[in-house]
Structure formats: C-alpha cells, structure tokens
Amino acid sequence: MMPIGRVLPLVALVALWAQPVLPAPAIISPLAQNSAPASNPSPAQNNAPATSGTTAHNAPPAAPRAPVQPIPFSHKQHAGTLKLPCEFCHAPSRSGDTVAIPQAESCMLCHQTIDASNPAIQRLAIYARDKATIPWVRLYELPSFVTFSHKTHLLHSATCLECHGPVAERVQLYKETDISMAGCISCHQAKKASIDCDTCHTLNQ
C-alpha cells in the first residue's frame, strides 16, 4: 500500500491536470484599441500610427490629444493630399523671420466656392465677413526673450517638419516636437550650429 504522504500530492496533481484550461485574458494595448474603427475617433486616433500585434509591455506611448480648434482643419488634406506648400497658408513676413497663422479672409479665397455648404466653412465665412480673428489654439510658441528666424533656419536647410512634425500626415495637429531650450540646443549640436547664448537671445550690451 502506497504511503499517504505520496498519495496526497498525486491526488492534487491529477485534480489540477483535470481542470479545463481557460484562455488567458487578451492584452490589448491602447494603440491597438485606437486602431479599431470607431464612430467618433479621438484626435489621437487620427494621428497615432497604427501598429498591429503590439502588446501593452512594448507599446509606444499614445499620441497626446490634439486641442480642439475653433475651425476643423486637416493638414493631411491640404498639405498631404493637395500638396499645398506651407507658405501657401503660412505667408512669411517681409523679413522672413516670422510666418503668418492664416485667418478667415485668406481661407475664403479658396473656400468661397470649395465646400461652401460645409457648416465649418460657413462658420469660417462668418469670421471673414466680420473681419474677426480666428482664435486658433497655438501649439508652438516661444517666450518673448527668445529670437527665432524662420528665414535663417530655412536658409540653413532646416525643414518645417523638423520643428513642427510631419504635419502633412496629420488630420489634427498636436505638439510632437521639443522646442524647449534643451531641444533646440540638441538640434544645433547635431547640425554643428552655434550654441552661443546670443544665437537665440538678445543680450544686454
């Protein structure tokens, strides 16, 4: 007769083996969830790249939510599909140091006839009629003590997407590049550009 000390472990082992095997709970990353079709996709869903087979353990961070703008505007449609250059809407100043944020009168040069029945375009027309400033939510804004010239950067082969991200791929924009002092210095070092203080700051004489 088998000793009781050996019988009990065998009984426990048989009981465990006989239990039905349940499927492990699926691990779905936020990115994989975002890639599923939805009736009302969030801005992050519109912008984040789709990745299949990604688990929660190795998923890249989800794209931050894009701010709600007063007029919906798709850079993907205008700069991507229609291939409009940046300066078509963002006209440079006379010096070339700054570029304009488009206002309704500029938009209506095209949209008087294009998609004129769209409710968003009709709101745009009201801004233009009233000569009102569209209160766009700024994504990138430098402090007043920082000097930045678009012209200088473009003349040194910098591209718009290096600071603003791949806007031609975005339905809605969100801040996705680092324009802090550390970010700018890192870029200057990589391109072997000056990092002297007076490159970006006007110092007291």
Image (tube, helix red, strand yellow):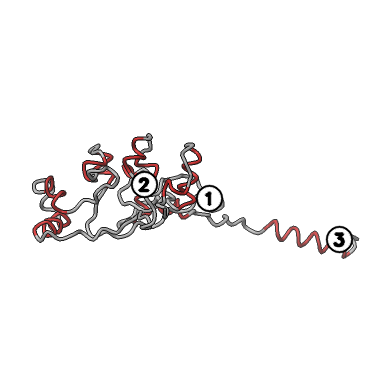
The amino acid type found where label 3 is placed reads Arg
The N terminus lies in quadrant:
bottom right
**Residue tagged 3:** 6
Which residue: 36% across, 58% down?
A: 144
Closer-to-camera residue (130/120): 130
Of labels 3 and 1, earlier in sequence is 3
Q: Judge the density around disc 3: few (<14), some (14-19), many (≥20) Cα neighbours within 10 Å.
A: few
Of labels 2 and 3, earlier in sequence is 3
Along the horizontal axis of the image, is 26 left or right of 15? left
Q: What percent of the width, then of the height, locates residue 117? A: 10, 53
Q: Which of marks 2 and 3 is in front?
A: 2
Callout 2: helix, strand or loop? helix
Q: Nearer the viewer, mark 3 or mark 1?
A: 1
Closer-to-camera residue (148/190): 148
Which residue: 42% across, 53% down?
A: 203
Q: How far apart are marks 2 and 3 (CA)?
A: 70 Å
State the count of labels.
3
Closer-to-camera residue (27/184): 184
Of labels 1 and 2, earlier in sequence is 1
Which residue: 82% across, 64% down?
A: 8
Q: How far apart are marks 1 and 2 (CA)?
A: 29 Å
Q: Residue 55 got which mark?
A: 1
Q: Distance between the residues labelled 3 and 1?
A: 42 Å
**Residue tagged 2:** 164
The amino acid type found where label 1 is placed reads Thr
Along the horizontal axis of the image, is 59 left or right of 135? right
Which residue: 87% across, 64% down?
A: 5
